Every structure is written in C-alpha cells, then in structure tokens.
Image (spheres, rainbow, N blue to C red):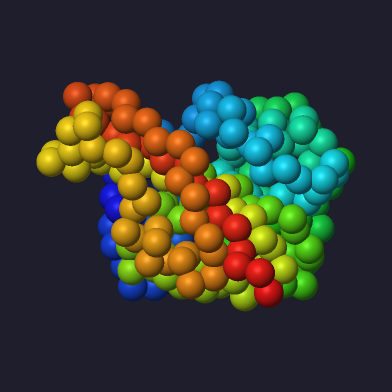
Amino acid sequence: MSNRAQQPATPSSSAATARDNPLWLQFWRDQRDDFHQAAVNPLLRRFWNGQDLAEGSRVFVPLCGKSLDLIWLLEQGHEVIGIELSPVAVAAFFRENSLKPSRRKIGKFVAWRHDRLTILCGDYFSLTATDLGTVAAVYDRAALTALPEEVRKLYVAHLERILPDTDKIFLLTAEEAETTETVATPPEIAAEVRHLYAEHFDIELTHAETLTEAGEFVDYKLYRLNAHPH
Ligand SMILES: C[S@@+](CC[C@H](N)C(=O)[O-])C[C@H]1O[C@@H](n2cnc3c(N)ncnc32)[C@H](O)[C@@H]1O
C-alpha cells in the first residue's frame, strides 16, 4: 500500500520512526503541510455515524496534525484526544481555530487542552496506556500511511498495547490505483491492511472510490475494524 497519494511529502523510509521525527518537525517549520486538508474529510462526515458510538464517547486521533476533523468530531459530541509530534502544528491548530488552550506537562508530553479536546504533543511511540486513558474508537486518516512501510507494523502493535479495550478503528487510506485495475475490478481490502490488522480485528471495506489527482488515479478506501470478541 503506497502512501504517496495521502501525503506526498512523507520522509523517506527509515527503520526507526525516531529518525523521521526531525523531518516531520522540519516540514511543519517550513510549512510544507500539503497533506493538511482545508476542509473536514468527506468520508468522515459521510460514514462516521455508522460507528454507532455512545454520546460523549472518547475518540483517539493518532498523528493528528492540525486536522479540522478534530473539530468535526467535537461537534458530534465526542471527547477527543489527539497526538502530534510537532508543536508548530499543535499551536497552528489552536490559533487557526481561535481556541485558547491550557498547557501542562504530562510525562513525555505537553498536553494542550480546550474543553473536550486534548492534544498530546510528543512522539506516538512514547505514549503509554496511562497517558491516553480509555477511548472508545480510533480515527486514523493519514496516520498509519504517514509512516514508512517497515514502521507500520510497530505502529499497529503499539496501538494494540496502549488501547487494549478499544474495539473500533475507522481507517482511511489512499493509494495509487494499480495500473492493472479496470472499472470492472471490485474493490478489495489491501493486502497490507489485512496483514497488519486481521489477527485482532474483523476488517470491513466500507467504501472505496477512485479519484483523479494530478493526472494519477488514487484509490480512497474506508475500513471499519472491529476487534474480535475478547
Ligand atoms: C500525513 S500527516 C496527517 C495529519 C492528520 N492526520 C491529517 O489528516 O491531516 C502525519 C502527521 O503525523 C505527525 N507525526 C509523524 N510521526 C509522528 C510520531 N512518531 N508521533 C506523533 N506524530 C507524528 C506529523 O508531524 C504529521 O503531522
């Protein structure tokens, strides 16, 4: 599964995420945030309600950037906790949305808070279950796919460690369409998604669409992952 379509500015592959962190920090300092969406993700708007979460449920948004999806999730009545490496991104999020957060050091993170929203600023791979607390669902847009392919397995393993009781993941991916695909080819679960999640989750491909971007075909897919019964 390629990550190119979702965020073309991804740092080059590296076996350890820590080695990519300086690159992400530099992207934000240089305002190279072309992965940022100027509007709420349309698939989130269209399909989130099917998650069937209780009013006020807590939602985790890993690698959240300054996504407007955080605001939309708050508007649905959720408590939201994001994690983002770059303080430039976190500061931009609050400034651009005219919110005045409090800031407090928690373990290896700085917690920026406003009302029902917390963004922990720091490295996802340092996050503990205690830092995070209980969450009902995960919203992943360009988080898994932001990471080098060899690190994605570690990302999923870490997610399972810090969220042992979370049953639901709403996963959005974008990948370059295979040149062999034809309109008649039914959309399929990407082999990598199956490989990463199938051991612990039932995987449903809820929606797929192919769009043309800069002359290339890009497959957008929405997966709902539901943990196997404990
Ligand atoms: C492709 S962007 C996606 C941001 C957001 N999910 C969105 O939809 O706009 C990936 C984000 O992950 C952040 N990031 C990368 N590695 C991280 C890490 N190890 N811990 C926390 N955040 C990280 C980057 O700074 C960047 O903002």
Q: Position of residue 17 (x, y in %)?
A: 43, 67
Nearer to me, 225 or 28? 225
The reply to whether residue 5 is in sight is no
Q: Give left or right: position of 70 versus 4.
A: right
Q: Position of residue 216 (x, y in %)?
A: 21, 30
Name which residue lies at 37% across and 51% down: 189
Nearer to me, 158 or 230? 230
Q: Position of residue 25 (x, y in %)?
A: 48, 52
Name which residue lies at 39% across and 73% down: 16
> Quick one: which residue is furthest to the left in this view?
180
Q: Give left or right: position of 26 versus 55.
A: left
The reply to whether residue 120 is in sight is yes
Q: Is residue 17 above or below residue 94?
A: below
Label count reads 0
Q: Position of residue 97 (x, y in %)?
A: 70, 28
Nearer to me, 34 or 205? 205
Name which residue lies at 68% across and 74% down: 230
Nearer to me, 155 or 124? 155
Q: Is residue 174 above or below residue 124?
A: above
Name which residue lies at 22% across and 32% down: 184
